[in-house]
Image: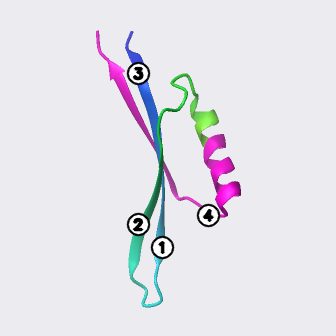
């Protein structure tokens, strides 16, 4: 079985300026618990949203693993 060495998430949302131009805003969190479940990562997203007052549209999970 493969072993996950690193786990990170990127939270993204689209911001629009006064002229209607869209820009992508991201927050990246690294060195998370490699045993985290998808439900725990969604909960982490909700906590970050509560702390920052931002609402993120996507949750991207980045795993680095060793293939044996």
* Mark 2 or mark 3: whose residue is earlier in sequence: 3
> Which is more foreground, mark 1 or mark 3?
3
Q: Quadrant of the N terminus?
A: top left
Q: Does the CB distance between marks 2 and 1 fall below 8 Å? A: yes
Q: Is residue 63 above or below residue 14?
A: above
Is 14 part of what is drawn in magenta?
no
Residue ID at (40%, 21%)? 5
Numbered disc 4: secondary structure: loop
Quarter of the image where one finds residue 65: top left
Q: Residues within 10 Å of mark 3 (few under 14, many from 20)?
A: few
| Res 24 label | 2
Q: Which residue corresponds to mark 3?
A: 5
Q: Does the CB distance between marks 4 and 1 fall below 8 Å? A: no
Q: Is residue 23 above or below residue 19?
A: above
Residue ID at (36%, 27%)? 64
Residue 9: give x, y in percent of width and height: 47, 42
Q: Residues within 10 Å of mark 1 (few under 14, many from 20)?
A: few
Q: CA distance from mark 2 to mark 3?
A: 28 Å
Q: CA distance from mark 1 to mark 3?
A: 33 Å
Give the magenta-colored segment's residue range: 43-68
Q: Which residue corresponds to mark 1?
A: 15
Numbered disc 1: secondary structure: strand
Q: CA distance from mark 2 to mark 1?
A: 6 Å
Q: Which residue corresponds to mark 4?
A: 54
* Mark 4 or mark 1: whose residue is earlier in sequence: 1
Numbered disc 3: secondary structure: strand
* Mark 3 or mark 4: whose residue is earlier in sequence: 3
């Amino acid at each position: 079985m493969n072993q996950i060495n690193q786990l990170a998430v990127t939270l993204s949302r689209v911001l629009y300026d006064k002229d209607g131009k869209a820009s992508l805003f991201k927050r990246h969190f690294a060195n998370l618990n490699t045993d985290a479940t998808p439900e725990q990562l969604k909960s982490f997203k909700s906590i970050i949203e509560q702390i920052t007052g931002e609402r993120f549209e996507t949750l991207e999970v980045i795993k680095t693993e060793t293939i044996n």
